[in-house]
Amino acid sequence: MEGAEGLTSEIVHRRLVAQRISSGALGEPGAVVAWLGAVQAQDYRAALWAIGLRTTDAREADVERAIADRRIVRTWPMRGTLHFVAADDARWMTELLAPRRAAAGAGRLRALGIDERALTRARRVLVRHLEGGRQVTRPAAYRALERARLAPGEQRGLHMLWRLAQDCLICFGPRQGKQQTFVLFEEWLPRARRLPREEALAELAQRYFSGHGPATLRDFAWWSGLKLADARLAVSLAGSRLQEEMVDGELHWFTDLPAPRVAADDRAYALPAFDEFLVGYTDRSAALDAAASRLVIAGGMFKPVIVAGSRILGTWKRRIGRGEVVCSIVPFAKLHQATLRAALAALERYARFVGLDLREGPTSPA
């Protein structure tokens, strides 16, 4: 591999393969989430598509069925942010990663007037309202807290739910209409595994570098929320399960080598907002230069993007109508006709996922 352009192109190719975007799509949603380790999910519909695009041909209803069937679960295991994780991984991953974020958020809880006594009372209230397999929406949970004189306003309710989820008391269940529900973690996921700390660290490193590699130690520490020293220990504990390679003067880790690169890849991919292809790394320059980055990432928000070849070529947006989804491409520069056709084919795949007809919106450069 010669030159910086070839170097970054190869990194992007290998990540697209490892992330199961460009090849090796998996058969069902649970396998996708387990392979990646976790899928960022504060944007619920975007996260459903992040999972669906990595399957052979899953529909949105298939991903929601995996939630209802308790194969994947949405909770706050890492970085204080919502993720989908495999049901079997939810406990050990949360117990490993959430305490550091919970400690960092303690000051915010105190500022909201939420002390340990309040959390103990909230715990009792939620157990009483959820036990026996009941599923309660967020508004209903807030009403229960209000009746117990635990005022949920000014984000206090959300912060109590967030904190108790990090203790594995609650997690999200399936949706009721458009409303998310909460369930008791122990009842919903009674067989979720516990792992000793060192085993959990090794497992986490293997999952991350399998589904995101090649990636650096800093990337892994960012994604997981681990201290850099703990991230380094995790890589060491994973041992021979990981391979390493020096890329541009920095060590990168990965697992199996990707499939041989084809001479020309004429496909494009429509990735959702907050996709792991971008959010899973602290250094995103391999796929996105500084000027384009400002058009994709702003204020902590990640827009949906179009990937073709080895670069992110633009963003896209969608509007749901009656029986159709209108998708518009916003390229960074004028697209070649072949690239535009490939991007539209990628959006057709998204339309099938949500069960609607695609209507092409205007394509206007940013």
Image (cartoon, rainbow, N blue to C red):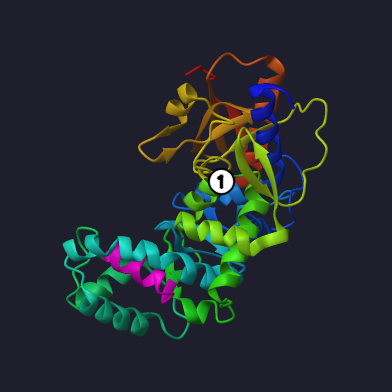
Q: Residue at x 29, y 61 (%)?
A: 105
Decide which of 324, 342 is in the foreground and name it: 342
Decide which of 131, 103 is in the foreground and name it: 103
- The x, y position of residue 111, in whole percent, is 17, 61
Q: Which residues are magenta?
A: 157-170
Residue 212 sits above or below residue 347 on the image: below
Q: Residue at x 34, y 78 (%)?
A: 126
Looking at numbered disc 1 in the image, what kind of residue is underneath it? Glu
- The x, y position of residue 132, in whole percent, is 45, 86
The rendered magenta stretch, by its main secondary structure, is classed as helix
The answer to whether one can see residue 87 in this image is no
272 falls in the magenta region? no
Residue 212 sits above or below residue 105 on the image: above
Q: Determine whether the residue tagged by mark 1 lies in a helix, strand or loop.
A: helix
165 falls in the magenta region? yes
Q: Residue at x 83, y 37 (%)?
A: 260
Residue 270 sits above or below residue 128 on the image: above
Q: Is residue 60 left or right of residue 317?
A: right
Residue annotated with mark 1: 276
- The x, y position of residue 123, in whole percent, is 32, 79
